[in-house]
Amino acid sequence: MKRALVFLAITFGITYAYDFLVVYPIAQGTAPYASEFLSPDLAYMVSVALTMLFPALGVVLTRLVTHEGFRNCVLKPRPWRQSLPWFVVAWFGPLLFVTAGAIVYFLAFPGDFDPNMTSFFTAQREAAAASGADGATLAAVDASAANPPLFALMLLGQCAIAPALNLVTTFGEEWGWRGYLMPKMATRLSIVPTMLVTGIIWGLWHAPVVALGHNYGTGYPGEPFDGIAAMCAWCTVLAIFLSYVTIRTGSTFAAAIGHGAVNGTTNGVTLFSLSGGNPFVGPLCTGIVGGLPLLGVAVVMLWDMRRREKAGTLRMPEAGLPDGVRHTRR
């Protein structure tokens, strides 16, 4: 557990320092060095995306300062006959439970369903006009609005390749949480508390950007603490899915693929909402209604991991070396 604590101290330390010294000034418009090269919105998005690399940096620094070395990195998957089906689940599973969550939400709130994405296209055209876009750009927006099924098909294609596009940044997170912390915690805790503890820790790691309005916006009752609490709950549920595919494949890359799929598909369902949705409710899978299918998947996966643990067949990957053991060069 000592190395896990070192990892947490390093990862939270560098992330929070970066958030307060870099992300906050960019978000507040007090970082002129950023606006000289990027638009404020793009600078903010890039700065937040870079935080996703810090858990991996935390792993590297922890392995170096504790003389653990780089054995058992939870990278190489088990034989493909065993692991390939779970890589497929990691790639396409999020698209299924995100879509199912949107369906559940729109069945519960049918008045918010906008099959032609009218609100989205209206907002796009207004934003383009306000920015002084040329006629060709406005015509492209109008062409998309005139053929919603084709636009939806293009959106589906983008979702299908999202895991590959997001792999670098999501691996940055997942090598830390699923490829290091989760196996370390599992050496001292049973599977259920391991999932709960790592999920809550993962949620708290997001706290500074959640307080800025990332994920849950601003102006809601109980801001920012209710948003942070919701993030911890969401991360705990999602962590079960990502941990499960990591355990079944033996590789952090499965979690990185699943995380990338979630990031690339979640926001797409809001295009079909007249109101734009509510991150606490839906159609986003972060909401209590939109997230019901993911919650169901997580419950089944947690039950299966607990069952395998009792039977002695849960193959938890080994991360690094046991506490007190150092890497020695030969």
Image (cartoon, rainbow, N blue to C red):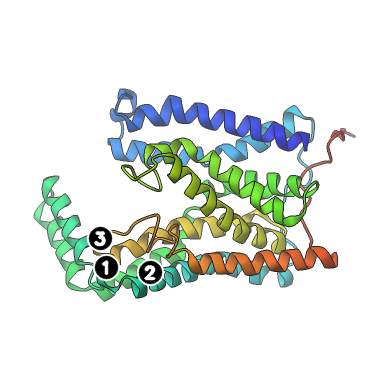
Q: Secondary structure at mark 2?
A: helix
Q: Is residue 202 above or below residue 266?
A: above
The residue drawn where x is 19% and y is 66% is 118
Drawn side of residue 196 relative to residue 167, left or right: right
Q: Secondary structure at mark 3?
A: loop
Q: Which residue is mark 2?
A: 105
The residue drawn where x is 37% and y is 58% is 267
Q: Which residue is mark 1?
A: 112
To which quarter of the image does residue 266 belong? Answer: bottom left
Q: Which numbered disc flags the more N-terminal residue, 1 or 3?
A: 1
Label 3, label 2: how many angstroms apart (C-alpha)?
13 Å
Q: Secondary structure at mark 1?
A: helix
Which image quarter is the C terminus in?
top right
Q: Picture coordinates of residue 128 (x, y %)?
A: 16, 51
The residue drawn where x is 39% and y is 29% is 24
Q: Which residue is mark 3?
A: 275
Q: Is residue 120 above or below residue 31?
A: below
Q: Are marks 1 and 3 in contact (CB under 8 Å)?
A: yes
Q: Picture coordinates of residue 67 (x, y %)?
A: 79, 30
Q: Amino acid at mark 2?
A: Tyr
**Mark 1 Cα-neighbour bin, 10 Å: few <14, some 14–19, many ≥20:** some
Query: Closest to the observer: 231 or 64?
Result: 231
Drawn side of residue 281 relative to residue 147, left or right: right
Which image quarter is the N terminus in?
top right
Q: Amino acid at mark 1?
A: Asp
Q: Which numbered disc flags the more N-terminal residue, 3 or 2?
A: 2
Q: Picture coordinates of residue 197 (x, y %)?
A: 66, 47
The residue drawn where x is 20% and y is 62% is 119
Q: Amino acid at mark 3?
A: Ser
Toward the right, the furthest residue is: 330
Q: Are marks 3 and 2 in contact (CB under 8 Å)?
A: no
Q: Which numbered disc flags the more N-terminal residue, 1 or 2?
A: 2
